[in-house]
Amino acid sequence: MRIKIDMNGNSPAYIQMSAQIAAAIRAGEYRPGDKLPSEAEFCHETGLAKGTVRKTFDKLEEEGYIRRVHGSGTYVQGWQPELRRMVQFDNSCKKEGMKPDECYRLLKEACGRFFAADIPDQAAMIDCTPEIAGDITRELVKIWNFDMKYYQIDGVRAGTFIPPEEIWITTKTHFEEILPVAEKAGKALLQVRLSVPATEEEEIAALDDDCLLGIVYDSQDFLMHISHTLALLGRHNTYYLCQKEEWCDKKRAIRTEDIIWLVSVQEEEIIRQMETMGSHYIVFNYGVTKDSLDEIRAIMEQRRK
C-alpha cells in the first residue's frame, strides 16, 4: 500500500497514516501475522519525521491492530470482535480512572495468547558448521514458526559472545559445552540429534567400492562430519577433497566421468554447475531425528501456554 498524507488537512499526519494502515488491515491487504515495513521504511516512503511514524505505530498498537516484537519487527494482529471489545474495555477503564499500565498489561497478555501462533519465535542456531546449521534450520521450520539466525560456536562457547535470542538450539555434540553459558545468560537451550535421510543412505551404500568420491566442503568441520558419516555407512573409498572456493579450478583438473561428487544441499550454485556439466553427484544433507523434532515441538508448545 502507499500512504498519502494531506499536509494541509485538519487531521495530524499520524492520525491520517494510522487510519490508512488500519483500513488496509481491515481490508485484508495486511493479514494477521504479516510483518509491516519498519519505521525507517515508512519515513523514507512518506517523508514524515521518525517521531510522527512512531506515534502512528503507538496508536495502532493501542488500538490492537499491531504488535511490536523486540529485535524482530512489527506484526499485524488482525482485527477480531473479541479484540475490539478488549480495546473498548481498556478505554472505558481509563475513563473510570484505572491505571493505564495495569490495563495495558492485561490487554497485551490477552492478545499474546490470542495471536501467539502468528508471531515467529526468534531462535539462535549455534554450530561450528554452516552447512549442517542450514540443514537443521530447514527441518525445524517445518514443525514450528521459528525465525532462526546462525552463529558460529567459538565465541558462544567461550562466553565472549551471547546471542540475543531467548531460545538457543545446537546439536547433541555441542550441547554440554554450551549449556553453562546458556544457563548463566538465562537462555533456553534445546538440542537436536542428526540423522542421514534413508534415500541418501541407500544411494551412498549402492556406490562401487573403487569409485572416487569428491567432497565439496565449506568448513573443515563439515568435512570431518561427512567423513565420519561415510565411515559409519561402510564407505572406504578414495576421496578427492575440494574446498568450495577451489571448485571452479579443480572441476577442470579431473574428468567428470572419473568422480562422484558429494555436495551439501546448501550449495545451490555448485549443484547447478554440476548439473550443467553432466557430473555425477549426490546432494547430501543431514536430517533431524523424529524424536528431536517431537521434543522441540512439545517444549515450544509449553512455552506458548
Image (cartoon, rainbow, N blue to C red):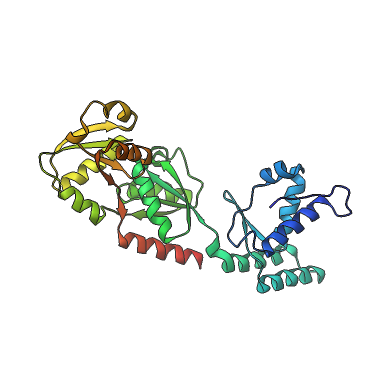
At which x and y percent is residue 84? 70, 71
At which x and y percent is residue 68? 63, 55
Q: Is 213 on the left-hand or right-hand side of 153? A: left
Residue, x 50% and y 65% (percent of image)?
Answer: 304
At which x and y percent is residue 271? 33, 40
Name above or below for residue 49 compared with residue 258: below
Quadrant hosting residue 281? top left
Task: Between residue 41 and residue 281, name the one nearer to us.
Answer: 281
Quadrant hosting residue 95? bottom right
Name above or below for residue 257 compared with residue 84: above
Residue found at the far left of this picture: 210
Q: Is 64 on the left-hand or right-hand side of 254? A: right
Task: Between residue 230 and residue 206, name the one nearer to us.
Answer: 206
Residue, x 58% and y 60% (percent of image)?
Answer: 33
At which x and y percent is residue 200? 24, 51
Q: Is 256 on the left-hand or right-hand side of 305? A: left
Residue, x 89% and y 48% (percent of image)?
Answer: 8
Quadrant hosting residue 43? top right
Count of marks, rendered view: 0
Q: Is 34 on the left-hand or right-hand side of 197? A: right
